[in-house]
Amino acid sequence: MPPFPILTAILPVICDSDAVRSIHIEAKPDHLLRLARLKDPVGAVTEMIWNALDAEASTVTVDVDINELGGVEYVCVQDDGHGMRHDRCAEYFSGLGGSWKNRAKVSPDLKRGLHGRSGQGRFRAFALGAQVRWVTVAESPEGGNVRSVITGASEHPTDFDISDPEPTGEPTGTRVEAYVPADFVNRLVQNDTARQLASVFAPFLTANPDVTITYQGEALDPSGVWADTAEYPVGWTGADGQAQPTLRVIEWEQDVDRVLALCDANGVVLDEIPPGIQAPGYHFTAYLLWDGFVERRGDLPLAEMDDIVELLDAARETLRAHFRERDRQRRARLIQKWKRDKIYPYSGEPEDAAAAVERRMFDEVATTIARRLPKQSQRTTLRLLKEIIAHDPSGLYPVLDELFRLPQAEQEELKRLLQRTTLAEVIKATGQVTARLDFIAALKLLVFDPENRKRLKERQELHKILERETWVFGDAYALMVSDQSLDIVLRRHLRALGREPDGDDADPVRREDGRQGIVDLMLGRALRGSSGREHLVVELKAPKVRIGLAEVGQIKSYAQAVVSDPQFRDARVRWDFWVVSTEMDDVVRRDATAPNRPPGCIAEWEGGVRIWARTWSEIIDDCEDRLHFYRERLNHDPATEHALDYLRRVHGASIADAACSQPNPAVVSAGG
């Protein structure tokens, strides 16, 4: 079925009388009234103004007479264009479609781009009044000006009467008069009508400063009602030798219908499409100016499927970039206002990169929901928001939704913001790195400061600290056993391999002298890219104890117990045994620096077993090497107070107090 089956025949019938020619259009009246869009009187006025500009008018005046009850009585749109020649009036009013404008593309003298193309604009006048009269003065081919009057009524939209020509001394132009007000014409007296018209004609008036459009005695001045305007070249490779397209963006103080208007280079709007972007809080009209639209004007309603779709995509991306920058500026102004009002919950500059990341997240979230902040408690709300971001950024969205009941558009904007920035994870990661840097500084105080070394006890203090900081020995290790017997080591080992021992069936594990043996720390990790595992057994010595032959003998006895017990055997597992303290004897150091083994390795046995003697200097150097990149980026150089504060918060006051005995500040920045 065709879209308009009523148009089986649209043929004008012209009847002449002594003073009037009657024109009849063979079309269904209800179809013609649908073309009139009776509920859109502002659109009707817009169409009349475009017709005037197509007729090369330089002055267009719109007057609306209002009665004592505030209702519209009469609408008049008058211009000083070239008018309609009498010998062509029948052609203009009898056709439906096939407008001369669609063929001409530009006006005859000024070469303006033509807005009209469908040959249906005259029906829009019925949205202004039930009776319409066009009074037009044009030059006659025989010389002089002649006046013609065309009348029509919405009761009979298929019929128009054209008067005989009348010589006149009046200047050229056309006056459209609408009487008997239409049902929705009072919308013309709403406060935003002039602003709506200004938004439509803004690019044309900007490109044609010699043109004046007056509504109710006031000249339309887009610059008087817009909030901001900007213009950008649109990068597109399909211009085919024509000038590159330009995107003009006008932001308005109050709400307007958002459109992306397709215009010629002079700002004549040829069609409108949705802008296709999200920009919460902004009222705007975008104008894409390009002369290539003139040649394609018949296809513009299908532009989204045409070969210019790439141009539309480029224009929309330019529009998004514009509002990203505008949003950045808006947020900066808002934050400055909060600072002036002394309600911004931060002071000074961020101390480090972690604090900078936290503050950036606060700024973005707070300025996103700024319109929802209660005026009487802004200070309290901003401080609450700061605390949530600092301590639980992952729980931010549910809290904000509960507090402010954000509308859907702002919910989506907030979700997009949090997903795009992943600032919660960044804050968490930078906090972890900063904490590790603080702990390294604290560890230096504990093991290198002479006073601390004398008092620090391996079993009660150092061991308890390190079982919570196993990353010191390697990032991928996880704690499996702390201060447990070799029997427990066996059970954890078998469990890691999926070989859970049954009850008490496992045989006890003993050192060579028959003693049980207590392991300080046993760490484990999976080997990347294989099904194997690696276990690390650490024997900690008090910092005042030097690693000598006795200490090496102890760690080797643990290794021997593992090697000699068949319950530990598994080709998929490698074992490393470390004995750790601040210093080692020369004889041990000789083995630890042997040229045929890795530094620190004092023995390698069959079955994937290695034995190491490590100093805290070496271990701390390894940690600082791993953290060096992050330390540089975070610009975090922990002082003594940072190290002690970390010990108090994480490991308790007694440990921190033990490290407070006249610490040597140089120890924090030097590895022993």
Image (cartoon, grey):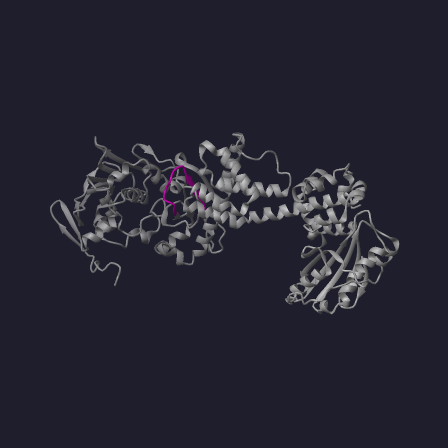
Answer above or below: position of 135 versus 106: above
Quarter of the image containing the C terminus? top right
285 or 381, nearer to the observer = 381
87 vs 330, left or right, is left
Residue at horizontal 40 percent and vertical 58 percent from the top: 306
11 or 131, nearer to the observer = 131
167 or 513, nearer to the observer = 513
55 vs 151, left or right, is right
Pinpoint residue 506: horizontal percent, then vertical percent: 69, 67
Q: Does the stretch in magenta take in 656?
A: no
State whether residue 14 appears in this view: yes
Pinpoint residue 209: horizontal percent, then vertical percent: 39, 37
Q: Looking at this view, name the residue that lies furthest to the left.
A: 18
Q: Does the stretch in magenta take in 256?
A: yes
| Magenta residue span | 246-259
401 or 292, nearer to the observer = 401
Number of labels in the image equals 0
Pinpoint residue 663: horizontal percent, then vertical percent: 77, 38
Pinpoint residue 263: horizontal percent, then vertical percent: 39, 48
Residue at horizontal 50 percent and vertical 34 percent from the top: 380
Answer above or below: position of 271 versus 654: below
Q: Looking at this view, name the residue that lies furthest to the right.
A: 587
Quarter of the image containing the N terminus? bottom left
636 vs 401, left or right, is right
Answer above or below: position of 639 versus 459: above
State whether residue 633 appears in this view: no
